[in-house]
């Protein structure tokens, strides 16, 4: 009853606030001046009557607001009553922290609510010379514009430290980063007016481990005083195109947990100045992590120009699917070309460069415009201050408020103590002059990025933490910012595919790390029930997990997973990934060993001779093992024979190995179980005629040409026309394709190898496949003949080798009879789907987008989806057609700073699933789209295959038993993202008793039939019952 009364009072208070606010609004309106400056003279009764009339109309119009408040209160009451009230932000040590509630209704004009696809339709994407601001327009102002409200300028010093690019992470730290951070402690303490922001926790944690406690205390004091702010707080500043949301969350949690454990701080603002395009997925994750604001920089120059002309560079970034404002995060888009000093003080880089005091004459860098900075003295301070203020004023004209942000930094800035003095001393003289002359109507100071956003929110009437959007409403925007172009037709769509071998390796580590995290957490919980064994390496395993998390996090950096680092830097990333894959396998083996032992007292840990040699929804899936004889049979844990298929392992296109064979069996799995392979032939045949080869299962029938080895037809009551491979070259212009840019010479040409392909057909009871070996590609089409999700799609495996080519990009093209017109869909980070439109007004390379998990097209009757096991670039250049670039080999640099081409190609295996689904209801017309349930599950099967572990069947081995932590299967639409053990705050680096349980309810399109899909789970409208069988164990929701 007490709680119910509290909700009633809370709702009543909100109602009173709304009414009183409306009354004050009316009071303000009635006492405003008329055009002649005379107050409206009405009798007191007339004024009162007008107020009442206005108030009644406004209250009627705002009934919906009150209704929303009432419904929210009811829902909140029910949530608390059911005991299901969980935080959206971080929870640690059992503390409950709720994000501030979103406003019921944003007072925003309809013209200020935009989807990025609509913006693209408006733009001509031309690039006229804009004057000093080459990609913009001339900016003018009146001197008296700030007479009533002075310009408030926040200069935010920063140093962008790439965790690997031209040097490795360790080399950058040794040569530059540690010196930046050491100087930061000294120089910020010299003057309390100085400020600084830092972003990359990977570097900060490495430095922290190497400094003494006295310096650590000094850092804590800087943070407490507000001189030092940690922005974003992730392990790195991640790429936002090729990264999967599992890894985005993991690196964010790793960074935030480190900050909480060592500094006791929680970031408030995101800072992303260098990722090559921006995704709403990152905005959503930051919002859920408790951040209120964010900044982005690399956006198409035409989009920036349009937003600047409309004064919409600051906006609430809302998710496509969000029907209210619950996902909104306040976002600032930097307006100019770059985040360096010449492009951040104002529109004229020639002038702004003169205020980058690291470029003073005699230094190692200078201004390319050949007008150097001047040290500030009493003799020149007036002229220099007015020149800088002119740029500040012009820049402020692009925004809706008189609060201005001016970043001050660049890559690896402030390495030397002299630069700290050059920048801070000269700027402080300029600030002192500006602030001491009230006729200039400006207040300038150093600030952090959160200082800026707090002032911005205050100037618009917003609450500092975002509860109230204020009187001056900022626009709302939904969509993403791909594909990025920084000038002309230079679209950064090449890096979507660059170095695909490492993109695939990243996904393998993600899958193995997830398995290791879950098994490790379950093992810790299980040990509490049975008692602590002497041998289980809990601390050692946790250290291996932590190292793997950090290596995976490091690879999410925007010059790592993108494939845009130097050759030796890429090797360093790859070595870390491979090392971590091997380490998490050790965690998997030792944890699974404990869980499947029937008698826990027999557990032993021997790393040199592991007992095992190397799941959530129940699944029917294929398990693959390799044996030395074709005479085998497969038994399950109960000793029953399981259907299996023995296949050849091929040494090359036409010769099978005689001593190694592949055994595949279908098994229904909802727990860790056992399959026994007992030693107990298949035949080769060659088809001489040219008739097409057919392979089929109960759902699909494929027709493959024996002449080309390519898919010609697929049947599902519908047809798919064909698939082939195509090649792109690079332009003959001065600027050519490189690691970042895709600049093709023309439309793609059909891949026609000089040698005829070798076509190999395998047919069996469990699967059939056709493998075609070309000069540069080994192409496999596989159908599974099993009851389950894997039987619903075509598995495609392409092993690509273009190491002997020059300036070549190879793509797979799939053509269908679907009337998709110019529309198609790509996912964003495996988390959501973004509608796309192929635009004839854009060059070919602009119509390629990142594909992290899937791309699909559709018409009113069917959908064609291509699911992927690695991030690549994808497009739909013609109606009914999908295209994916699989590898790129480029001989030259593309002039974006890397200084080399992409010539370190490796033989790379790309894996896909091709899914064709009939529609059972009309196609949606909303500005968002969802995969089907079957598509979601097929993607999970592709990216999270079953992990098989072998054990010798010796008579003295201990007995094993199936282990399942679940009492029932997860719902089909519920995904266990992670079960992540949290580090203890005690010394030693071991685990605490807390674990982060991260769940994701997947949105899905209900317009597709779920009959005969082989799904062994159901949906539950997002409700999760108690389905675990865990002993006492604390679960903490982090994201």
Image (spheres, rainbow, N blue to C red):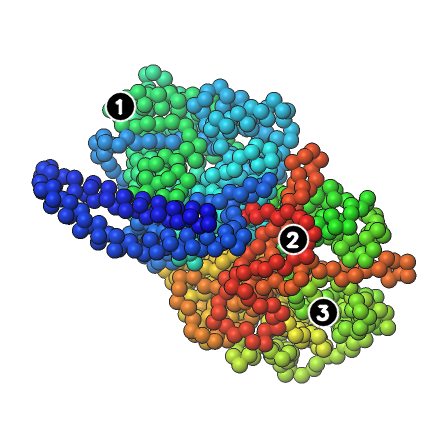
Seen at 80% across and 69% down, the residue is 638
Q: Earlier in the sequence, mark 1 or mark 2?
A: 1
Callout 1 crowding tier (Cα within 10 Å): few <14, some 14–19, many ≥20: few
Label 2: state its secondary structure: helix
Residue 716 position in % (x across, y down):
55, 79
C-alpha distance separating marks 2 and 3: 22 Å
Closer to us: mark 1 or mark 2? Answer: 2
Q: Along the horizontal axis of the image, is 939 left or right of 30?
A: right
* Residue that numbered label 2 is attached to: 514
Compared across the picture, whether 143 is left or right of 1029 comes to left
The residue sitting at the right extreme is: 955
The furthest residue to the front? 1
For the point 45% across and 22% down, which residue is it?
Answer: 192
Q: Nearer the viewer, residue 174 or 522?
A: 522
Residue located at (56% from left, 23% from top) = 218
In primary-sequence order, the first of circles 3 and 1 is: 1
Up-down: is 771 above or below 461? below
In percent of width and height, residue 83 lies at: 54, 52
Residue 391 image position (x, y, % from top left): 32, 33
Res 999 → quadrant: bottom right
């Amino acid at each position: 009853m007490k709680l119910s009364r509290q909700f009633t009072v809370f709702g009543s208070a909100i109602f009173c606030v709304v009414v009183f606010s409306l009354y004050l609004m009316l009071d303000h309106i009635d006492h405003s001046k008329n055009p002649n400056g005379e107050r409206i003279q009405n009798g007191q009764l007339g004024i009162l009557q007008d107020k009442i009339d206005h108030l009644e109309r406004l209250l009627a119009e705002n009934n919906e607001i009150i209704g929303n408040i009432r419904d929210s209160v009811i829902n909140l009451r029910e949530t608390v009553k059911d005991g299901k009230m969980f935080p959206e932000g971080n929870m640690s040590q059992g503390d409950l922290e709720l994000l501030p509630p979103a406003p019921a209704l944003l007072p925003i004009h309809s013209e200020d609510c935009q989807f990025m696809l609509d913006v693209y339709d408006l733009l001509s994407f031309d690039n006229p010379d804009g004057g000093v601001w080459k990609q913009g327009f001339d900016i003018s102002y009146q001197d008296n514009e700030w007479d009533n409200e002075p310009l408030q300028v926040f200069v935010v010093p920063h140093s962008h430290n790439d965790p690997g690019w031209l040097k490795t992470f360790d080399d950058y730290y040794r040569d530059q980063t540690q010196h930046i951070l050491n100087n930061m402690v000294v120089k910020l303490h010299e003057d309390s007016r100085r400020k600084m922001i830092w972003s990359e926790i990977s570097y900060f944690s490495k430095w922290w481990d190497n400094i003494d406690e006295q310096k650590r205390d000094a850092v804590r004091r800087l943070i407490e005083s507000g001189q030092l702010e940690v922005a974003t707080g992730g392990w790195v500043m991640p790429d936002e195109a090729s990264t999967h949301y599992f890894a985005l969350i993991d690196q964010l949690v790793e960074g935030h947990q480190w900050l909480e454990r060592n500094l006791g701080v929680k970031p408030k603002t995101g800072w992303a100045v260098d990722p090559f395009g921006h995704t709403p997925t990152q905005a959503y994750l930051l919002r859920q992590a408790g951040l209120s604001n964010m900044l982005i920089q690399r956006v198409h120059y035409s989009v920036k120009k349009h937003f600047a002309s409309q004064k919409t560079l600051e906006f609430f970034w809302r998710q496509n699917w969000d029907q209210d404002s619950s996902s909104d995060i306040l976002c600032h888009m930097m307006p100019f070309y770059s985040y360096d000093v010449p492009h951040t003080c104002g529109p004229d880089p020639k002038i702004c460069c003169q205020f980058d005091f690291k470029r003073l004459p005699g230094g190692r860098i200078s201004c390319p415009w050949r007008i150097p900075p001047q040290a500030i003295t009493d003799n020149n301070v007036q002229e220099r201050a007015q020149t800088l203020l002119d740029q500040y004023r012009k820049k402020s004209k692009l925004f809706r408020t008189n609060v201005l942000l001016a970043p001050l930094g660049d890559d690896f800035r402030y390495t030397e103590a002299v630069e700290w003095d050059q920048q801070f001393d000269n700027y402080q003289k300029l600030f002192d002059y500006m602030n001491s002359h009230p006729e200039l109507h400006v207040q300038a100071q150093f600030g952090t990025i959160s200082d800026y956003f707090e002032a911005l929110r205050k100037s618009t009437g917003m609450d500092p933490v975002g509860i109230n959007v204020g009187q001056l409403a900022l626009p709302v925007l939904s969509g993403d910012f791909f594909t990025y172009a920084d000038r002309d037709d230079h679209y950064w769509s090449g890096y979507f595919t660059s170095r695909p071998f490492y993109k695939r390796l990243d996904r393998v580590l993600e899958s193995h790390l997830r398995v290791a995290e879950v098994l490790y957490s379950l093992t810790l919980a299980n040990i509490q029930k049975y008692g602590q064994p002497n041998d289980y390496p809990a601390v050692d395993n946790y250290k291996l997990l932590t190292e793997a998390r950090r290596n995976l996090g490091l690879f999410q950096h925007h010059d790592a997973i993108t494939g845009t680092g130097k050759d030796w830097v890429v090797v360093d990333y790859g070595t870390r990934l491979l090392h971590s894959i091997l380490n998490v396998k050790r965690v998997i083996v030792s944890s699974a060993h404990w869980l499947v032992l029937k008698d826990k007292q027999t557990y032993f840990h021997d790393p040199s001779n592991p007992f095992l040699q190397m799941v959530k929804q129940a699944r029917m899936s294929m398990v693959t093992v390799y044996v030395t004889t074709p005479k085998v049979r497969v038994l399950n844990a109960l000793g029953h024979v399981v259907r299996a298929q023995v296949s050849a392992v091929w040494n090359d296109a036409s010769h099978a190995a005689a001593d190694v064979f592949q055994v595949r069996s279908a098994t229904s799995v909802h727990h860790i179980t056992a399959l026994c392979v007992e030693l107990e032939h298949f035949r080769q045949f060659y088809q001489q005629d040219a008739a097409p080869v057919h392979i089929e299962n109960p759902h699909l029938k494929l027709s493959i040409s024996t002449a080309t080895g390519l898919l010609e037809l697929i049947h599902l009551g519908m047809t798919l026309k064909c698939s082939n491979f195509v090649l792109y070259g690079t332009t003959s212009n001065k600027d050519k394709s490189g690691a970042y840019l895709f600049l093709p010479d023309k439309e793609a040409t059909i891949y026609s190898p000089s040698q005829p392909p070798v076509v190999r057909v395998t047919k069996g009871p469990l699967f059939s496949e056709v493998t075609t070996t070309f000069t540069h590609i080994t192409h496999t089409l596989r159908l599974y003949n099993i009851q389950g999700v894997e039987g619903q799609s075509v598995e495609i495996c392409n092993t690509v080798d273009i190491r002997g080519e020059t300036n070549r990009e190879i793509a797979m093209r799939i053509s269908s009879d679907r009337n998709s017109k110019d529309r198609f869909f790509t996912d964003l980070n495996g988390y959501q789907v973004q509608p796309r439109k192929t635009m004839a007004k854009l060059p070919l390379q602009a119509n390629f987008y990142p594909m992290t998990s899937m791309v699909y097209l559709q018409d009113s009757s069917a959908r064609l989806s291509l699911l992927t096991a690695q991030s690549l670039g994808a497009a739909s250049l013609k109606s009914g057609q999908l295209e994916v670039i699989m590898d790129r080999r480029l001989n030259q640099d593309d002039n974006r700073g890397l200084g080399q081409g992409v010539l370190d190609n490796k033989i790379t295996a790309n894996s896909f699933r091709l899914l064709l689904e009939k529609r059972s209801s009309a196609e949606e017309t909303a500005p968002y789209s969802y995969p089907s349930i079957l598509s979601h599950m097929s993607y999970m099967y592709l990216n999270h295959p079953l992990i098989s572990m072998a054990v010798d069947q010796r008579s003295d081995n201990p007995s094993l038993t199936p282990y399942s932590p679940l009492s029932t299967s997860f719902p089909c639409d519920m995904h266990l993202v992670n079960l992540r053990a949290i580090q203890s705050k005690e010394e030693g680096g071991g685990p605490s008793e807390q674990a982060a349980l991260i769940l994701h309810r997947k949105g899905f399109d209900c317009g597709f039939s779920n009959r005969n899909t082989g799904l062994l789970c159901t949906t539950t409208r997002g409700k999760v019952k108690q389905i675990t069988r865990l002993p006492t164990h604390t679960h903490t929701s982090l994201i």
